């Protein structure tokens, strides 16, 4: 079913946590492992606007629906960052804009070249490249949902579980947008299918890999995606991705876990 | 201004408070039924459509900003996320006004050819060229973006005020007043950031002055139809009232830290070419 952008924009809200008793963390704090993972998630959410940059350098920014979606998507993700940083704040971990900024400053040359690389590729592949971006976006949003769900299961803290459930619910609408876009565009073009397969198969890595240290990526993947339950979640994401036209059989999440040495 | 804390002698714009109190869907406040009895004139409709197109072009503008060092400043990007959200709903309000007047939404209405002017080639650059030159320019480019953002707010404010004065529609005047109220915080942020950055960094001043020499206005105009741009320039900055508006903006630009009358003139002469 086509994604209704007007309905989405009309109902997009910042995630609410005012009714949740976050103060309960003062008596029942989260453990170090979870806090480290939450910190990673916070950075990724705040960084969303930078993914928009890569998306915007392709022809997609001229389309009104895409533009409307991205406006709301960006804002929702920013508020996920705010919600998670509030939880961290109660644990005495401050995530201020200046610290996020310091992290981005460290990215250096690779980060400077990224938009150029993306733009050049976008120019070459034209509209087919938008299809690749949409498939990539879908993979990232599916990963986010699984990550939040896993985190909620592992922590068994009712307040955190409720907050993560609310965030994951918004991510599900993002998935709906990306998959509906990806499905349509991939179905229309064999070239887009080949490009998407090539890009996801060779270059996809867990969300956050491009902005966080490898040690942090390994920590989060070990925490959330290791063991039988973790693998089950990874396979769910892979199954969803390989359901897109031309992407049958892709196992990008499992492959990336193997590459990072995360035990099954 | 929405402020918190003190930075030196200055209070700083509170980005978190701005994000928390962002203003979205305005449809309930637009008095749309008024237009049935008193529809807007063709010129006013044309201005509303043109302003809607400018307000909605946030993603194009964001792209140009984010391929530079501006994307590294998390405070600026946090602002831009909410700024884009508020502008989306301003554009939606203008769309609703068009529909209530029996007109097509601005993205559905056909648009003429863009203006081909060599002096605007810099504003017409694609993301690749912008990203490449931004590597050399580094952090001072943020001052260019906030200062052009500020001047753009002054210009569009003049346009909205002119439109309200010319339209003789109470409903439109009230919608414009709401829009200007929303945009005031955008101006406050750009004002705060620009003055601080221009005061602190001579390179930021140099780069901003260079950019102002060739900048076209409002931001995003290079992507709009030539005939609509000419119409806008005459409507807002033509005639006696227009001259006064231009001169006001010229003075405001000239009074920014490190800038002078030459920069004010560079901007003013582009407003009514």
Image (cartoon, coloured by chain):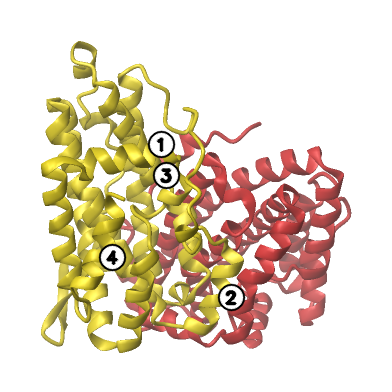
Chain colours: A red, B yellow
The residue labelled by disc 1 is B227
| Cβ atoms at labels 2 and 3 below 8 Å apart | no
Identify which residue is drawn at 76% across, 58% down.
A124
Dot 4: within a 10 Å radius of its alpha carbon, few (fewer than 14), some, or many (20 or more) residues? some
**Tags 4 and 3 both on a single chain:** no
Labelled pair 2, 4 in contact (Cβ < 8 Å):
no
Residue that carries the numbered disc 3 in the rendered image: A12
Distance CA(mark 4)–CA(mark 1): 22 Å
CB under 8 Å between discs 1 and 2: no
Chain containing mark 3: A
* CA distance for labels 4 and 3: 41 Å
Q: Nearer the viewer, residue A50 or B4?
A: A50
Whole-Å distance between the Cαs marked 2 and 4?
A: 26 Å
Residue wearing tag 4: B266
Nearest-to-viewer mark from 2 and 4: 4
Q: Rate crowding at label 2 as few (under 14), some (14 to 19) or many (20 or more) other CA atoms within 10 Å.
A: some
Of residues B272 and B8, the one nearer the viewer is B272
């Amino acid at each position: 079913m086509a994604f209704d952008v007007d309905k989405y924009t009309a109902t997009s809200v910042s995630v609410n946590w005012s009714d949740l008793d976050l103060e309960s963390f003062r008596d029942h704090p989260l453990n170090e492992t979870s806090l480290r993972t939450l910190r990673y998630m916070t950075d990724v959410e705040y960084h969303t606007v930078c993914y928009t940059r890569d998306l915007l350098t392709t022809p997609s920014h001229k389309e009104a629906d895409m533009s409307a979606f991205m406006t709301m998507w960006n804002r929702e993700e920013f508020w996920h960052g705010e919600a998670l940083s509030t939880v961290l704040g109660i644990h005495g971990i401050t995530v201020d804009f200046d610290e996020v900024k310091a992290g981005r400053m460290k990215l250096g040359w690779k980060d400077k070249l990224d938009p150029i690389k993306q733009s050049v590729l976008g120019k070459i592949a034209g509209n087919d490249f938008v299809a690749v971006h949409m498939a990539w976006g879908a993979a990232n949003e599916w990963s986010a949902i699984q990550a939040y769900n896993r985190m909620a299961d592992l922590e068994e803290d009712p307040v955190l579980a409720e907050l993560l459930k609310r965030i994951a619910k918004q991510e599900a609408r993002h998935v709906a947008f990306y998959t509906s876009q990806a499905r349509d565009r991939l179905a229309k073009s064999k070239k887009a299918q080949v490009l998407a397969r090539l890009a996801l198969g060779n270059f996809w890595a867990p969300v956050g890999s491009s902005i966080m240290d490898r040690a942090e990526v390994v920590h989060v993947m070990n925490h959330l995606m290791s063991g039988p339950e973790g693998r089950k979640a990874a396979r769910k994401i892979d199954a969803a991705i390989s359901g897109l036209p031309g992407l049958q059989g892709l196992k990008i999440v499992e492959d990336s876990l193997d590459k990072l040495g995360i035990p099954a | 201004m929405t402020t918190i804390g003190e930075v030196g002698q200055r209070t700083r714009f509170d980005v978190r408070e701005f994000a928390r109190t962002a203003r979205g869907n305005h449809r309930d406040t637009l008095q749309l039924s008024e237009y049935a009895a008193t529809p807007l004139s063709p010129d006013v409709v044309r201005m509303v459509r043109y302003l809607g197109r400018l307000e909605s072009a946030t993603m194009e503008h964001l792209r140009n900003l984010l391929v530079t060092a501006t994307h590294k400043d998390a405070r600026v990007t946090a602002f831009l996320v909410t700024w884009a959200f508020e502008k989306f709903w301003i554009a939606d309000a203008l769309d609703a006004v068009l529909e209530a007047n029996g007109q097509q939404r601005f993205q559905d209405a056909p648009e003429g050819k863009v203006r081909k002017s060599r002096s605007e080639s810099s504003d017409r650059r694609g993301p690749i060229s912008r990203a490449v030159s931004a590597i050399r320019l580094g952090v001072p480019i943020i001052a260019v973006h906030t200062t052009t953002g500020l001047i753009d707010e002054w210009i569009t404010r003049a346009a909205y005020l002119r439109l309200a004065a010319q339209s003789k529609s109470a409903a439109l005047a009230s919608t414009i007043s709401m829009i200007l109220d929303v945009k005031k915080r955008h101006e406050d942020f750009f004002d705060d950031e620009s003055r601080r950055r221009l005061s602190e960094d001579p390179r930021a001043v140099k780069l901003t002055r260079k950019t102002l020499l060739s900048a076209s206005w409002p931001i995003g105009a290079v992507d709009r139809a030539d005939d609509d741009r000419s119409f806008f320039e005459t409507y807002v900055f033509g005639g006696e009232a227009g001259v006064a508006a231009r001169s006001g903006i010229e003075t405001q630009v000239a009074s920014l830290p490190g800038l002078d009358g030459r920069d004010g003139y560079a901007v003013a002469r582009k407003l009514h070419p």
